[in-house]
Image (cartoon, grey):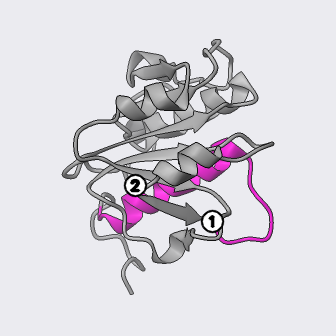
């Protein structure tokens, strides 16, 4: 469905509202371009301010059917150090990882200015990335999810908890 047509076709659709602060999301050493494209599409829908990849240049694939590259910038970094030195001022780096210090996403309070970092599906976040994260969250479950699915869940959780969907029945009870 083309950008903007959803509300016309489905007048009851709930669209996220812009709140204070900013957020971006990306993947450290992604394994496939499809995961980047799918996460980029989710980031566009969930109104992220930017996307990034570390360690791999992005090749266009068909999973980004909304052509999100026209709406959200993608930053490419050759290393974690390069990425970390480019973080926005006063932004919190939030790792998404099954780790000993991770807290459940269900109880996590998202920072106003956040950069969410996901690891590759094979290796997760690098040791250096984990050391540099201000917070580390996990999506409850015994196994890891597909990286683009995990990123989409984190973005939805942020919007839901920060009131970006307005007064939605069942939220905050």
Please rate how many residues cluster around mark 1, counting C-alpha atoms within 10 Å: few if below 14, some from 14 to 19, many from 20.
many
In this rendering, the answer to whether 72 lies above or below 27 is above
Q: Residue 1: in sight, yes or no?
A: no
Measured from the top left, where is residue 103 in percent x and y? 54, 72
At 80% across and 63% down in the image, what residue appears?
143
Instruction: Classify residue 78 by image quadrant.
Output: top right
Residue range corresponding to the magenta coloring: 139-163
Q: Nearer the viewer, residue 92 or 111?
A: 92
| Cα–Cα span, label 1 and label 2 | 29 Å
Which residue is tagged 1? 139
Name the element at disc 2.
loop
Q: Earlier in the sequence, mark 1 or mark 2?
A: 2
Residue 133 x, y percent position in the rendering: 46, 53
Q: As displayed, is residue 130 above or below residue 61?
A: below
Dominant SS of magenta comes to: helix
**Residue at x-position 68% and y-position 62%:** 98
Element carrying mark 1: loop
Q: Is residue 141 left or right of residue 81?
A: right
């Amino acid at each position: 469905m083309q950008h903007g047509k959803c509300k016309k076709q489905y007048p009851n659709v709930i669209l996220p509202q812009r709140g204070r602060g900013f957020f971006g999301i990306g993947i450290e050493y992604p394994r496939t371009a499809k995961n980047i494209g799918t996460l980029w599409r989710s980031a566009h829908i969930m109104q992220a301010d930017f996307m990034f990849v570390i360690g791999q240049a992005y090749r266009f694939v068909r999973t980004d059917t909304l052509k999100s590259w026209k709406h959200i910038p993608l930053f490419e970094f050759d290393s974690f150090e390069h990425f970390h030195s480019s973080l926005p001022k006063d932004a919190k780096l939030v790792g998404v990882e099954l780790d000993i210090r991770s807290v459940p996403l269900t109880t996590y309070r998202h920072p106003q200015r956040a950069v969410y970092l996901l690891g590759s599906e094979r290796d997760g976040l690098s040791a250096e990335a984990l050391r540099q994260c201000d917070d580390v969250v996990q999506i409850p479950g015994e196994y890891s999810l597909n990286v683009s699915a995990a990123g989409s869940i984190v973005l939805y959780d942020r919007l839901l908890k920060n009131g970006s969907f307005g007064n939605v029945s069942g939220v905050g009870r």
